[in-house]
Amino acid sequence: MNASSSRPAAWPVPTLNARDGGLWLEDLPLAEIAARFDTPTYVYSKAALESAFGAWQQALAGRRALVCYAVKANSNLGILSVFARLGAGFDIVSGGELARVLAAGGRADKVVFSGVGKTRAEMRQALEAGIRCFNVESAAELEHLNAVAGELGKLAPIALRVNPDVDPKTHPYISTGLKGNKFGVAFADAPDLYRRAAALPNLRISGVACHIGSQLLDPAPMAEAAEKVRDLVDRLAAEGIVLEHIDLGGGLGIRYRDETPPAVADYLAPLLAVFEGRKEELCFEPGRSLVGNAGLLLTRIEYLKPGETKNFAIVDAAMNDLARPALYDAWHEVVAVSPHAGEAVEYDIVGPICESGDFLARARKLAVREGDLLAILSAGAYGMTMSSNYNTRPRAAEVIVDGDRAHPVRQREAVAELFATERILP
Ligand SMILES: *Cc1c(COP(=O)(O)O)cnc(C)c1O
């Protein structure tokens, strides 16, 4: 990146910079990307993806460990191919995600399969592909998996996803490790379930897994969960159930606004201390922390609409493109791509969808005009993957920037595609 470029410390996207009066990602002006691919478009920085993954690799150097990128955060094949080439494993939650990983060049033997509702067809698909491990979330799932593996004449590698019942202190919708939510098995039930798994002929006990929540900003709850998991591993070993790997899930948070998440190394240090000197392979499933701040959503202002109490900037992106603000009241930084001289005015940034919840940001001061481009930052995780076609809106294009080149990794949908499989009545 050009050394003369400037960037306010406030921008969470590391490769975003200001040059020649405009915003650039790496060495490419965002205005050029909008001109070539139109808007709304998700734009990702390859260098930011690589450096996020590199931070995990460095923090785990010298430790037998596998970083399995949580595909649900952003499942674009281009993104998956970047991580596959860096040697990542993948954490999937559906057969569809498995198909994406394989299409992007990922290795099945580095795939772990999470989720409470795996169907028999998905189990079959994953067994045939030869995945590394099923993270099993209930007693009934053990039985289903044993039966499906038996039909195929295969041995299914399993970990039980246990619920360590620690409070991750995050948003209630994204906390998953507390009693009373649908994920994992109760900690107290785990030994019994391992015994049951050991007695089933078509399962091979490989490890244990946990995942306590998302957007974690404090390493302490995770370290507490890790200690509980370690003690469980020792208890199981004492009765002859020996685990080869320990999967500590994902959840490391990122900065959207003024959060101060720990650096990857600082997040991992207390966890690594819990497993110091042990031989089990450690596995992690980061999603957001690998892609969240590598991406932004580029959108254009269609209208400026002054109001009596509020001004609106109506843009061509909407809640169907980026659901997080509507869903979690999430905050994303919004930056004008080519700011004008003159006074900044406060706007709510809203989309054209017929819902009052259709906003991307509220009360932002911007010096902008109709037709200007805005960059909605930190949109790399749970942006495109949660998008929909609500209001028959074609989903956005996606582009990965590498230096001064833009690689289109997903074409904008055409309206005709949206109803190509629908039929009018005869
Ligand atoms: C969602 C999820 C992850 C990834 O969570 P992030 O907060 O994006 O890191 C990892 N593991 C499991 C089981 C998940 O459900």
Image (cartoon, rainbow, N blue to C red):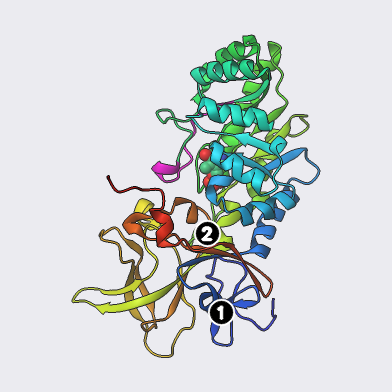
Query: What amino acid type is highlighted by mark number 1?
Result: Glu
Q: Residue at x 54, y 28 (%)?
A: 121
Task: Check disc 1 and report its element: helix, strand or loop.
Answer: helix
Counting from the top left corner in percent of width and height, residue 284 is at: 64, 40
Q: Residue at x 70, y 49 (%)?
A: 84
Residue furthest left as drawn? 308
Please say if 11 is above or below 175: below
- Residue 157 lies, in percent from the top left, at 67, 24
Asked if residue 64 lies in the magenta stretch, the reply is no
Badge 1 is on which residue?
32
Q: Earlier in the sequence, mark 1 or mark 2?
A: 1
Q: Is residue 191 left or right of residue 329?
A: right
> Where in the figure is residue 240, as x and y percent of width and height?
71, 12
Residue that appears at 41% across and 46% down: 171
- The residue wearing badge 2 is 255
Q: Which residues are magenta?
A: 160-174
Please state which amino acid type lies under the numbered disc 2.
Answer: Arg
Cα distance, mark 1 to mark 2? 27 Å
Q: Is residue 217 visible?
A: no
